[in-house]
Image: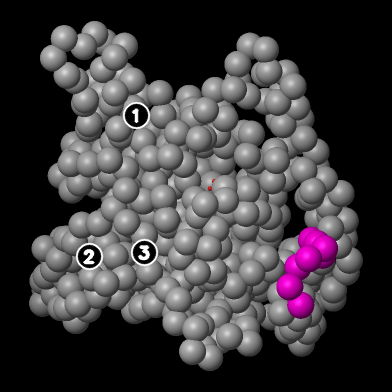
């Protein structure tokens, strides 16, 4: 009840697209009944969480923050959300995000931007971006409207918003979480993951989100480790790699200081720190911004005005005109930009020059990580090149926005588990995050180092 009241009072943040108090109350009632019957409680019995509005929820509007899917009520439940309900959790509502998860500031949502609960100190009261695309999730957790939430991460959308709002979030190894019932953006990159106040809560949520799903052809058929039980912050005997290419020109002094602080912390926890090289780092952003739009342009072809949501059809229009009118009205400008870039790089004349080349570079980036992990167990980097920026500061300049993903996209391209943990405040009093990247399937190592 306390969370339901908080959610209803915090409308100004615009973190929720839909509130579902009845869903959370039903889970709480089920937990009470189990207690009354003397049964053992499920791992998330009665825990109210927020669901990024990219996960299909049966009978509850699922929009991907787009006009295209406004009013769409799926007749099925995504595997990840079903697992959370099976573990006893309940849903407080569907959380706002960048439209189709494309963005780094939550400003591309059809339902309006989310406002971060944080403000800069020193009199500058400009409203700040909560990060994106999981900006509703990060704002809701950081404002304590929900104890935890789901996010999805294609190029950083769990980690960057977590860093901007002083919370924790982990993107597991590609294939750990089923993508079934998650609105597709770039299928070879999309991964769901938990966001929460701290690492332990992330571990508990993650355990109840992952697992083999025959309905997702890229789902990993592996047992689910007991991450929470195994959590240990002891880094004795571990080698932590510091990738030298991440020391980019122009990185603010405060971010470099934060990184040094992180290096001192892992040394204190017993780790040995080694410098490593990821030589293809500088190609990661351009590679990502070819592959992600290419896959998006293909995935978003399904929104044709026939099968889902919106249909724009004027009297006398033919099928082609209906397609064009529906897609022009249903997709926002950033989504249209990605579709145009994606169809261009996949077109017959340019496929080899762009898409094939990007796929090759992606392999080189993955090999960089493999080589680095022969010298170390985990990597430590900043999560983002800056603290949260003001709303409107970058929204007119797509390139400035894309640059924000510079530290997060490489691990996405390589499918590696990666987490952002809160690591302190900058001089304006805004949270900064550090990123820990692990070997494939080493969520345990990532979570432990995050503690
Ligand atoms: N900011 C990146 C993009 O716009 C990442 C988004 C995401 O991870 N969903 O593509």
Secondary structure mostly seen in magenta is loop
Q: From what the image shows, is residue 413 above or below residue 449?
A: above
Task: Based on the picture, tell me whether residue 129 belongs to the magenta stretch.
Answer: no
Q: Quadrant of the C terminus?
A: bottom right
Judged left or right of residue 382, residue 397 is left
Q: Which residue is mark 2?
A: 92
Label 2 residue SS: strand
Q: From what the image shows, is residue 437 above or below residue 188?
A: below
Q: Which residue is mark 3?
A: 114
Q: Quadrant of the N terminus?
A: bottom left
Note whether residue 193 is visible: no
Q: Which residue is mark 1?
A: 328
Distance between the alpha carbons at the discs numbered 1 and 3: 24 Å
The answer to which image quadrant residue 19 occupies is: bottom left
Segment colored magenta: 246-253
Distance between the alpha carbons at the discs numbered 2 and 1: 32 Å
- Sequence-wise, the earlier of marks 1 and 3 is 3
Q: From what the image shows, is residue 295 above or below residue 20?
A: above
Q: From what the image shows, is residue 250 above or below residue 221?
A: below
């Amino acid at each position: 009840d306390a969370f339901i009241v908080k959610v209803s009072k915090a409308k100004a943040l615009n973190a929720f697209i839909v509130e579902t108090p009845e869903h959370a109350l039903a889970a709480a009632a089920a937990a009470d009944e189990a207690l009354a019957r003397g049964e053992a409680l499920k791992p998330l019995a009665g825990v109210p969480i927020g669901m990024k509005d990219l996960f299909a929820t049966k009978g509850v509007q699922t929009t991907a923050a787009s006009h295209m899917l406004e009013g769409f009520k799926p007749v099925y439940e995504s595997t990840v959300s079903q697992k959370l309900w099976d573990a006893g959790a309940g849903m407080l509502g569907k959380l706002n995000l960048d439209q189709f998860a494309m963005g780094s500031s939550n400003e591309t949502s059809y339902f309006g931007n989310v406002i971060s609960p944080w403000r800069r100190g020193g009199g500058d009261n400009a409203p700040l971006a909560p990060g994106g695309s999981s900006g509703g999730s990060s704002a809701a957790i950081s404002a304590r409207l929900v104890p935890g939430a789901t996010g999805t991460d294609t190029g950083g959308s769990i980690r960057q918003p977590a860093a901007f709002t002083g919370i924790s979030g982990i993107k597991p190894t590609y294939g750990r979480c089923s993508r079934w019932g998650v609105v597709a953006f770039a299928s070879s990159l999309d991964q769901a993951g938990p966001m929460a106040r701290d690492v332990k809560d992330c571990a508990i949520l993650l355990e109840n989100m992952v697992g083999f799903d025959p309905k997702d052809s890229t789902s990993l058929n592996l047992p689910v480790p007991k991450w929470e039980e195994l959590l240990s912050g002891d880094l004795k005997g571990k080698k932590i790699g510091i990738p030298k290419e991440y020391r980019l020109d122009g990185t603010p002094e405060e971010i470099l200081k934060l990184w040094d602080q992180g290096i001192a912390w892992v040394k204190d926890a017993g780790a040995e720190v080694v410098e490593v090289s990821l030589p293809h780092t500088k190609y990661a952003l351009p590679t990502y911004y070819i592959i992600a739009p290419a896959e998006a342009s293909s995935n978003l072809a399904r929104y044709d005005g026939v099968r889902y949501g919106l249909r724009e059809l004027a009297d006398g229009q033919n099928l082609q005109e209906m397609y064009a009118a529906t897609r022009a009205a249903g997709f926002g400008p950033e989504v249209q930009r990605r579709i145009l870039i994606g169809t261009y790089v996949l077109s017959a004349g340019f496929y080899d020059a762009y898409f094939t080349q990007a796929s090759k570079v992606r392999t080189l980036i993955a090999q960089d990580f493999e080589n680095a992990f022969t010298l170390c167990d985990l990597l430590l980097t900043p999560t983002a090149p800056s603290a949260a920026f003001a709303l409107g500061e970058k929204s007119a300049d797509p390139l400035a926005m894309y640059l924000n993903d510079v530290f997060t996209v490489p691990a996405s391209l390589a499918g590696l588990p990666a987490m952002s943990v809160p690591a302190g405040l900058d001089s304006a009093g805004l949270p900064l995050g550090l990123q820990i990247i692990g070997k494939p399937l080493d969520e345990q190592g990532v979570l432990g180092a995050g503690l």
